[in-house]
Amino acid sequence: MSRINGGINRYALDALDVRPDDPVLEIGFGPGDALRTLAARPGGFTVGIDPSETMVDAAAARSRALIESGRLEVGSGTVSRIPCQDARFDRALSVNTIYFWPSPEEDLREVARVLRPGARLVLAFRVQRTGAGDAAVPRQRGQTSQASLSVVQVWLEGAGFREVEVRRRKFRVYDAAVVSATKA
Ligand SMILES: C[S@@+](CC[C@H](N)C(=O)[O-])C[C@H]1O[C@@H](n2cnc3c(N)ncnc32)[C@H](O)[C@@H]1O
């Protein structure tokens, strides 16, 4: 997974534009490539959540020194119920997870809850072109409908984000969108 998703994670991190002491949340960190980069910031603080106990255990084992130094916390959680207090973070990142979110419109409100006003959110994900040339977020787990990028923008605005910017990028094995937005 790391080899395939390395490019999109690097691109998403660029868009996140993290400042040295921003508290950052990563949702669905998986193998943890972006998480390790974020946690390596001297003086920074990063929280990673993932519903997979396997991913959480692997990240905890691999990043023990960063956790012990207080720069990183990893734990079990989903985007629908983020185990963090309100207005905790200045940045939030989620790469290649939106297809698994049970209710993206509501889930984005939960993301907004843990962000401070002015905080930046970056979502990066694969897209598929539709017949009309629009791009859609592939849905998984038996869901038949697809969300176009303009629908993602409407979800973000409904959840209290503004300055939504969508950038398209072709990676080696897929087309992707990197969407950044600011919490109002
Ligand atoms: C394709 S992997 C991407 C991992 C990593 N972000 C990357 O780019 O390499 C998807 C990740 O999303 C997590 N995930 C699945 N459902 C989720 C949910 N409802 N909320 C948050 N994360 C979820 C999975 O456990 C998995 O680690």
Image: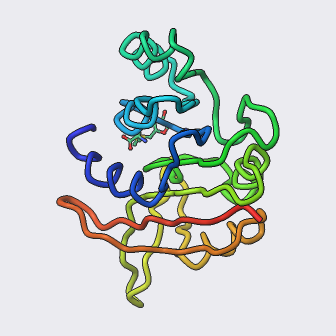
Left or right: where does residue 27 sit relative to residue 86?
left
Residue 36 image offset from top left, x and y in percent: 39, 30
Q: Nearer the viewer, residue 143 or 100?
A: 100
Question: In this view of the protein, can residue 74 be seen by the observer?
Answer: no
Question: 135 above or below 76?
Answer: below
Q: Residue at x 43, y 58 (%)?
A: 125
The residue shown at (56%, 16%) is 70
- Front in this rendered view, residue 13 or 145: 13
Q: Quadrant of the N terminus?
A: top left
Task: Describe residue 65's horizontal placement relative to residue 161 as left or right.
Answer: left
In terms of image quadrants, where is residue 176? bottom left
Q: Looking at the rendering, which quadrant does residue 38 occupy?
A: top left
Q: Is residue 50 above or below residue 60?
A: below
The reply, left or right, for residue 77 in relation to residue 133 is right
Residue 94 coordinates in the image, percent (x, y): 51, 48
- Residue 128 is situated, as x and y percent measured from the top left of the image, at 37, 70
The C terminus: image quadrant = bottom right
Looking at this view, name the residue that lies furthest to the left: 172
Q: x, y percentage for residue 71?
A: 53, 23
Q: Is residue 167 above or below residue 91?
A: below
User: Considering only vertical position in the picture, is 95 above or below 66?
Assistant: below
The one nearer the camera, 34 or 82, is 34
Residue drawn at the location 44% of the way across and 23% of the way down? 55
